[in-house]
Image (spheres, rainbow, N blue to C red):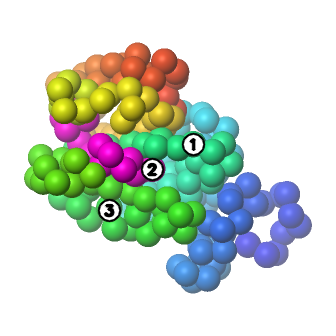
Amino acid sequence: MQDQPRGTDPVDRLDPVVLHHVVNTLGWPDLRPLQKAAVGPLMDGEDAILLAPTAGGKTEAAAFPLLSAMRENRWTGISVLYLAPLKALLNNLVHRVDSYAQWLGRRAALWHGDTGESVRRRIRTESPDFLLTTPESLEAMLISVKTDHARMLGGVRAVVVDEVHAFAGDDRGWHLLAVLERLERLTGRRIQRVGLS
């Protein structure tokens, strides 16, 4: 990341704290091409589909620019939803995403069918910045009488859909679109959509 003059490398747009941790905590000498290519569009609020093989760094390609945008634009509360088709995938991701969020004094949390009521209560009262969930759990939040929908989800700015191909061409895909439309009506703004495949 140090070879090019400042301003020419897309990673220079990332928050300096994120860059510091990429190099010093993760020990990465540089970002992968997909991760670099994602920085500008995601920080500019564009919708995108990020394609890479398994273990190709898609989560980081989405997380690093969105965390940087979160800090740059002073987003508060749950501002990024990370949706996946399987609870097991979310269980594997939450600690990694939370560690990235903590670099900036932010937090990620997990909410799905196996999440206990005490954890849900904490999420309702102490909103994380990243919420990892399934489309079905997101719908349950949107209709729950226990949830102040506007307070909890009204600040969502971006939605990352992992394994987006798993939703294509079946009823879960239509369900996901309907839930995202309902979420946009709640927030009163267009929500950035990022698909990972």
Along the polypeptide, which appears first: circle 1 or circle 3?
Answer: 1
The amino acid at mark 1 is: Trp
- State the image coordinates of residue 151 (x, y, percent, origin top left): 39, 32
Query: Within the image, what quadrant is residue 42 found in?
Result: top right
Q: Residue at label 1?
A: 75
Q: Which mark is residue 30?
A: none
58 vs 149, left or right, is right
188 vs 124, left or right, is right
The residue tagged with tag 3: helix, strand or loop?
A: helix
The amino acid at mark 2 is: Asp
Q: Which mark is residue 93?
A: 3
Residue 127 part of the magenta segment: yes
- State the image coordinates of residue 23 (x, y, percent, origin top left): 63, 78
Query: Within the image, what quadrant is residue 20 found in?
Result: bottom right
Q: Which mark is residue 129?
A: 2
102 vs 176, left or right, is right
For marks 2 and 3, give the CA distance.
15 Å
Residue 47 in view (yes/no): yes
Residue 169 in view (yes/no): no
Which is nearer the eye, 111 or 194? 111
